[in-house]
């Protein structure tokens, strides 16, 4: 067990569910920037066991909910902070992957779940800022990003795609290694219109 949510987690969660007033955007954005700058103090242990975790890490959970709150507001003022969060954070698998049969695979639940960068990608799609397109394309192309993050980036691209981007999405989607992200890319390109 990774511990129980603390007041910061709960506050961010409630904000993501209830806050729709753009007057609060500067404060939410500032909080996201503060939490993105935090280091996670749980050691990455892949092959020697699972670290004992008694407290949920603040960064991933709070950033996830704050990004959702900013996406719900869809305020253009959030774009720079969200873009910076994606550009300055490492992909989820940047420092390695656990053996799926070893005990370290459970580390994902201790630290990297939820994939807060997925919520940031989703929020960028809601803002409609075309500057996000190259960043989101980079996320989809880099398989060191978690599947959730790549999926959210593909879906966000669907909201932002112009005709030139649709051609790139079509090319990326053809033969993409994950079916769900492939489908999201092809939907964003206008290739898939009917549900399975």
Image (spheres, helix red, strand yellow):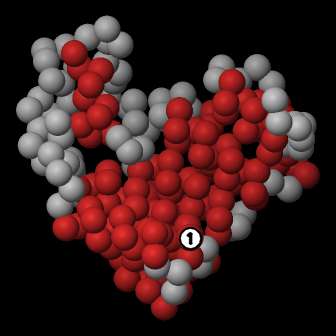
Please give left or right for residue 8 compared with residue 115 in the image: left
Q: Quadrant of the N terminus?
A: top left
Q: Residue at x 48, y 91 (%)?
A: 23
Residue positioned most to the bottom: 23
Please give left or right for residue 11 compared with residue 133 in the image: left
User: Residue 159: x percent and y percent?
Assistant: 75, 57
Please give left or right for residue 24 compared with residue 62 in the image: right
Q: Does residue 11 lie above or below 3 as drawn?
A: below
Q: Residue at x 54, y 28 (%)?
A: 143
* Nearer to the camera, 163 or 88: 163
Q: Is residue 11 visible?
A: yes
Q: Does residue 16 lie above or below 101 as drawn?
A: below
Q: Residues within 10 Å of mark 1 (few under 14, many from 20)?
A: many
Quadrant of residue 113 within the rendered picture: top left
* Nearer to the camera, 21 or 25: 21
Q: Is residue 41 visible?
A: no
Q: Residue at x 23, y 67 (%)?
A: 8
* Nearer to the camera, 6 or 182: 6
User: Residue 185: x percent and y percent?
Assistant: 75, 38
Quadrant of residue 188 within the rendered picture: top right
Q: Quadrant of the C terminus?
A: top right
Secondary structure of residue under mark 1: helix
User: Residue 64: x percent and y percent?
Assistant: 40, 56
Residue positioned most to the top: 101
User: Residue 15: x percent and y percent?
Assistant: 39, 73
Q: How many marks?
A: 1
Q: Does residue 107 lie above or below 36 as drawn?
A: above
Q: Residue at x 60, y 61 (%)?
A: 124
* Nearer to the camera, 3 or 135: 3
Residue underneath mark 1:
72
């Amino acid at each position: 067990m990774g511990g129980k949510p603390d007041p910061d987690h709960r506050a961010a969660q409630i904000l993501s569910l209830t806050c729709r007033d753009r007057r609060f955007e500067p404060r939410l954005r500032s909080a996201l920037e503060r939490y993105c700058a935090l280091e996670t103090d749980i050691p990455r242990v892949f092959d020697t066991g699972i670290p004992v975790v008694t407290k949920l890490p603040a960064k991933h959970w709070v950033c996830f909910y704050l990004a959702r709150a900013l996406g719900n507001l869809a305020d253009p003022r959030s774009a720079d902070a969200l873009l910076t969060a994606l550009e300055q954070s490492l992909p989820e698998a940047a420092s390695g992957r656990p053996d799926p049969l070893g005990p370290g695979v459970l580390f994902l639940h201790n630290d990297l779940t939820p994939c807060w960068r997925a919520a940031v990608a989703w929020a960028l799609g809601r803002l409609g800022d075309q500057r996000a397109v190259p960043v989101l394309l980079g996320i989809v192309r880099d398989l060191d990003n978690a599947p959730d993050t790549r999926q959210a980036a593909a879906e966000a691209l669907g909201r932002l795609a112009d005709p030139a981007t649709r051609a790139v999405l079509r090319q990326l989607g053809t033969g993409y290694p994950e079916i769900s992200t492939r489908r999201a890319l092809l939907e964003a390109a206008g290739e898939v219109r009917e549900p399975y």
